[in-house]
Amino acid sequence: MFAATPLNRRSDRNQSVAKAVFGLMTVVLVIPVLLIIGTLVVKGAPAISWEFLFTAPRNNMTAGGIFPALVGTIWLVVVALLASVPVGVAAALYLSEYAPDNLLTRAINLAIVNLAGVPSIVHALFGFGAFVLFFNMGQSILAASLTLAVMTLPVVIVATRESLQAVPHAFREACWNMGATRWQTIRKVVLPNSISGILTGVILEVSRTSGETAPIMFTGATAFLAFLPESVFDQTMAMSYHLYYIATQATADVPEELTYGVALVLIAIVLMMNAVSIAFRVYLRGLKKW
Amino acid sequence: MVDGSPALDGSGALGGSPALDVAAAPATVNAGTGPLYGEPPIIEVRDLTIAYDGQPALRDISLDIFRHEIFGIIGPANSGKTSFLRALNRMDGFNPGMDVRGSIRLNGKDVNDWRNVYALRSRIGVVFPLPVGLPLTVYDNVAFSPRLRGIRKKVDLDEVVERCLTRAALWDEVKDRLDSLGSLLSGGQQQRLTIARALSQEPELLLLDEFSIAVDPVTTMRIEDVLRELRSELTIVLVTNLVQQARRLADRTAFFLMGEMLDIGVTEDLFEGKVTDERTTGYIEGRYG
Ligand SMILES: Nc1ncnc2c1ncn2[C@@H]1O[C@H](COP(=O)(O)OP(=O)(O)OP(=O)(O)O)[C@@H](O)[C@H]1O
Ligand SMILES: [Mg+2]
C-alpha cells in the first residue's frame, strides 16, 4: 500500500551509513579510555589495601601508603571550594540576573570563558607570584587552594550561569509582574530550580581540582611530609603531586605497582566524583519542574 | 488640562481631551457596581508611543479607562495590544529594547513617577496568553503574592488561596492536589492558575491578554461570569481575539490596527456600526484581519 520509492530507499541507505560512521567514531573514542582504566586496574589493584590507603609512605616512598596525600588532597579541594563557590555563584548571579546586557557585560563574559582556557601552568605561576610571594602566604594549603580556586572559578561561573539560564525567563517575568523584586524572584524561584545544576557544576569542579598538579606544585604541595597538615598555613602532600613525584622525581626505585596504585586511587576519586555528578544530573531530570 | 478632573459635560466629552474621547465616556453615570464614568479615570493614557529597537509598535494612543469598567481591546495580530498592556505595568523595565513615550497615569500619578515600581506592579494583575505555572506547588503559586505582602499566617493564606482558585474556576479540580507542581498542570489549568495568581494580588487593575486562548469554552464562560462579578471590585482591561468575548464583557471597546487606535466607544455602539472608521466594522464582521 505504502510502497517505498527509490528516494525512500536511498535515504534509508544514507541513514545506515551515517549511523555506522558515527558508531565507529564512538568506538574509537571509547578504546583509549578502556585501555587506560584497564591498565591501571590490572597493574594497580594489587597495591591497594587498607594499609596502602591509611598509612604514610615509608623508605623514601618506595613502600607504605598514601594517607597524607589523600588527606592533603581533601584539604586542598575543600579550601578551594570554600573560596571559589561563593565568589563564583555570586558573580554568576550578578552576570545572569542583574547585569544589563551591554558591551561591558559581554566583555566580562568573554573574559571568563577565556580564563577557563588559560593553561594551568600559567595559573600556577600567577598563584606563586600573587599568593605565595605578594600576599606573603608562603607555600601553604591556603596559597595552593586559592590558586586552584582562581583556576576553577570560570568553571563554577559558567556552570552556574548555565543552570540559571536554564530556568525559563517567563518564570521571572511572572514573578516580577506580581511585584517581586529581582532578589525575591531569585530566592523563591530561580535558585531553587537551578541549585541542583549548580551543585553538579561544583562536583565536576571538585573532580578537576583533585587531579591538578601544576597549580599546586609551586604553591603548597610538598613531596613528603610524615605528618598531616594542621592548618591552612601548612604545606601538604597531595595525590596528584605525589604521583608526579614518585613517577618522575624520586631518586630511589619506586615499585611500579605502587605508582599504578596511586594513579588508580586518583582516577577512582575523579571517576567517583563524576559518577556522583552524573547521578545528580539524572536525579535532577526526574525533578524537572516544567 | 489632562491633569484636571475630567468631569463629563453634557455631550460626554472630556474637556480638552482628544476627539476620540467623545465616544470614550458615555454620559450614563452608573451607581453601584457599574463603571464610574463620572469620577476621575483610573488610567489616563496620553500620546502613548511604543517602539521596539526603533520599530514602532504603537503610535499616539490617548484614552481613559474608568474605575469598575471592563475595557476591551480588539484588533488583529501585530496591532500593539500586548505592547499596550506591557506599558501599563512598566514591563519595559524588563526589556531594554522597548521604548515607551508619552504618559500613562495610574490614579492620576505617572507610572514613571512611582518610586517603587514593585508596589506599582503588585497593584496590577496581569495574565498573558501563554500560561505560566511557576515551578512551585499550586498552593505556593497562589500564595506567592500574599506572602510578598507579608501575609504569613496559614489560615489567612489558606483563605486567599481557596478564594482565588475558586474565582478562577480551578478550585474543584485542584483542591485535592494543592501540593502538586503548578507547572505540571494542563495548559488550561495553568492558565486559570495564572488568573488565580493575578487575583491573589488583590489588584486594582487586572490586565487580561487573550486569557481564554488555552481554556476550553465551558470554563471560559465560567471565568467570564467571574470577571463580570469582579467588576464591582476592580477595573479590567481585556485584550481579546474573540470579538464576541469583547461584546459579552466589555463596557467600552477600542479597536487597534497596526499600532493605531482607529476606534473607541461603547461596545454595543461599535457592534451596531456606530464607528468612526469603517475598518472597525470590517474587523468585527470578520471581513478584515
Ligand atoms: N519583546 C519584543 N521585542 C521586539 N519587538 C516586539 C516585542 N514585543 C512585540 N514586538 C513587536 O511589536 C509589534 C506589536 O506586537 P504586540 O505583541 O503588541 O501585538 P498584539 O496586538 O498583541 O498581537 P497579537 O494579537 O498577535 O498578540 C509587533 O510588530 C511585534 O513584532
Ligand atoms: Mg498579543
Image (cartoon, rainbow, N blue to C red):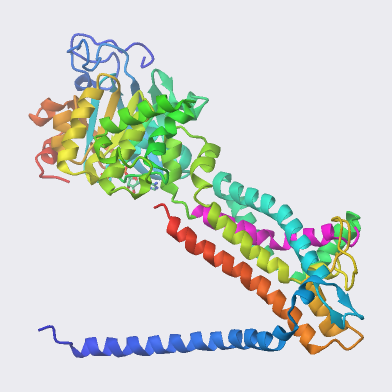
Q: Is residue B129 visible?
A: no
Residue in front for this viewpoint, A170 or A223: A223
From the top left corner, tell me how far across and down residue B124 is, in percent.
Answer: 38, 28
Q: Residue at x 31, y 35 (%)?
A: B195
From the top left corner, tell me how far across and down residue A164 is, in percent.
Answer: 53, 52
Where residue B136 sits, quadrant-wise, is top left
**Above or below: residue B24 compared with residue B285:** above
Residue at far left of view? B272
Residue in front for this viewpoint, B283 or A143: A143
Query: Is A154 within the magenta?
Result: yes
Main SS, magenta residues: helix
Q: Residue at x 36, y 11 (%)?
A: B4
- Point out the stretch of residues depicted in magenta: A138-165
Residue in front for this viewpoint, B84 or A234: A234
Where residue B259 sits, quadrant-wise, is top left
State which quarter of the image contains the N terminus of chain A.
Answer: bottom left
Query: Is B228 within the magenta?
Result: no
From the top left corner, tell me how far across and down residue A73 is, in percent.
Answer: 77, 66
From the top left corner, tell me how far across and down residue A145 is, in percent.
Answer: 78, 60
Q: Residue at x 19, y 12 (%)?
A: B30
